[in-house]
Image (cartoon, grey):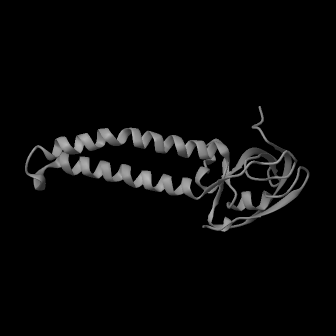
Amino acid sequence: MANSGDFNPITAAGYRDLQRKIAALEADRPEKIEILAEARAHGDLSENAEYSAAKRDLRHLESQLRFFNKQLQYAKVVDPTNNDAVELGKWVTVTFMDDDDQDTYQLVGTQEADLDAGKITRVSPLGKALLGHHPGDTVTIQAPNASYDVRILTVSLTAPE
């Protein structure tokens, strides 16, 4: 049995997303196998570009499937509590003290990070520094090349409108 340190925290939405990715890959698998079988039937495999491409595509699909299944196997869904502390799954609006710029982020598991969608990982410098803090707190972020301060404005269970 794995101990709790072996699991990766993930939001419920991130867990469902992994399940969707696995289902999509599993749905594509029969077609990839059929394409490989058809290409194999074309004769000499050493000079069969279709066969090589089909084999590579199937191998890539299988690799992705193993990767996502491992992520799912070690994922532990974390439900955030209904309080004002920054924790996995919550949305945090901060002001960057050096330029008064405001941004909102959702703190997510490492496999869910997507900066374009405002999702930062709990192990990023900003995510790590925000964890456990509350609105009104000023937090210093130790980034690789510098440090900077942010003030937490809001913490919520849902994305701001």
Indicate left or right for 136 with 33 as reference: right
Residue 148 versus residue 5: which sits nearer the camera? 5
Vertical order, 149 against 160 (above or below) = below
Query: Which quadrant of the figure contains the N terminus?
Result: bottom right
Q: Residue at x 59, y 42 (%)?
A: 16
Q: Is residue 68 visible?
A: yes
Where is residue 145? Give x, y as percent. Answer: 67, 67
Residue 53 % position (x, y): 24, 48
Task: Name the outermost residue toward the top.
Answer: 161
* Residue at x 75%, y 45% (from the top left corner): 103
Q: Nearer the viewer, residue 73 or 153?
A: 73
For image coordinates 87% across by 48% down, the residue present is 84
The quadrant in which the C terminus is found is top right
**121 left or right, relative to 83:** left
Residue ranking furthest to the right: 136
Figure disc tally: 0
Residue 42: x percent and y percent?
10, 43
Q: Percent from the top left, x then y, of residue 31?
A: 30, 38
Q: Residue furthest left?
A: 44
Taking 152 as reference, is 34 left or right? Answer: left
Q: Which residue sits at x=43%, y=52%?
A: 64
In this rendering, position of residue 26 left or right of residue 148: left
Q: Is residue 144 visible?
A: no
